[in-house]
Amino acid sequence: MHADGQVLRAAYIHNIIRFSDMDRLHENLGYDVVATLGEGARSTIYAVKDRRGQLYALKHVVKEKAKDQRFLDQAILEHKVASQLNHPSLRRCYKMIRQRQLLRVVEVFVLMEMVDGVTLEHQRPTDLIQMCQICGKIADGLESMHEGGYVHADIKPNNIIVTDDWSVKIIDFGQSCQIGTVKQRIQGTPDYIAPEQVRRKAITPRTDVFNLGATMYWLLTGSHITTMIPKGIGGGEQTEPEPTAPPIQVRPDVPAALSALVMQCIETTVNDRPDSMARVRDRLDLAIGQLVRRASPPPAEAV
């Protein structure tokens, strides 16, 4: 799991901060460590302050073995992509620092926007209107990313941070790629991965549509869709996914428009999915309209 996926509110963090890291970050980079926000494969995220007291998130990635090069590559890619994007629902990246030994990069630091919130995995909305509004903000952020020529390619609850006012930040651009990229290896998260990611076909905005659809399904039902690489199957074994029950069958209070949208987003055939995040957002607005009308009392009859 990426360290980004474990970001929690700094006030609630009780991880032990290594004093060697504190001293090194202060002396070499000019940042003081406030808290350890999370740890993942070869990476640690710190809450840090600069000399002016500005708070940031700092990702530190270390290459210990040759096979760890991919973690460095993902951190470098994350900065490259996020530093080009500017949208309220996309986490900003400000700076990348490389540390070398014998001319080889062995460590990378990525300075990022600090977000005061928790992931959707840790704070799943129970109100359907609120859930639709959150997913609409995710769709807006991804639409901006697609307009910039990139696909996120790893949308899941763990990569969405929500704040107290239910603002949204999409994080972790380490698997992002230019639209149309064919990756050399399978990348994605088993319970959310699209068929074209497993089959190593072109990655397009509709890949993000699938990932978002799988995310919406979990938000609505608490269950995962079946994908070609189900979680828990060893060795990344591929299977043909079984049919997924529509959300409305699992949870009868889900509006028909929302259930239909989710099912179309997770269509196996790429071209059967909504063709843009703008279309997804419009249909979420339709579902919100259904929910609002359902909650409104009928007009009183004239006497």
Image (cartoon, rainbow, N blue to C red):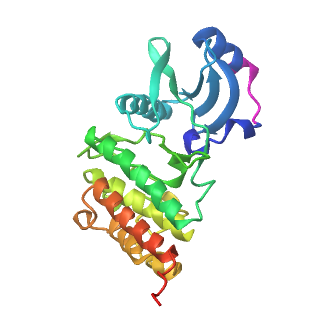
* Residue 198 visible, this orientation: no
Q: Is residue 262 left or right of residue 199?
A: right
**21 on left or right of 280:** right
Residue 285 in sight from this viewpoint: yes
Q: Write down the quadrant of residue 14 in the picture.
A: top right
Instruction: Write down the region rendered in magenta.
Output: 15-21
Locate residue 156, reporting x and y percent. 48, 54
Number of marks in picture: 0
- Magenta span includes 116: no
As rendered, which of 71 and 139 lies closer to the eye? Answer: 139
* Horizontal arrangement in the rendering, residue 301 relative to residue 34 (left or right): left
Q: Residue furthest top?
A: 27
Q: Is residue 4 above or below residue 156?
A: above
Question: Measured along the vertical axis of the image, is residue 154 above or below residue 34?
Answer: below
Question: In x, y percent, where is residue 176?
Answer: 37, 41
Q: Classify 273 as above or below 182.
A: below
Left or right: where 144 falls relative to 303: left
Which residue is at the far bottom? 303
Residue shown at the point (48%, 77%) measured from the top left: 294
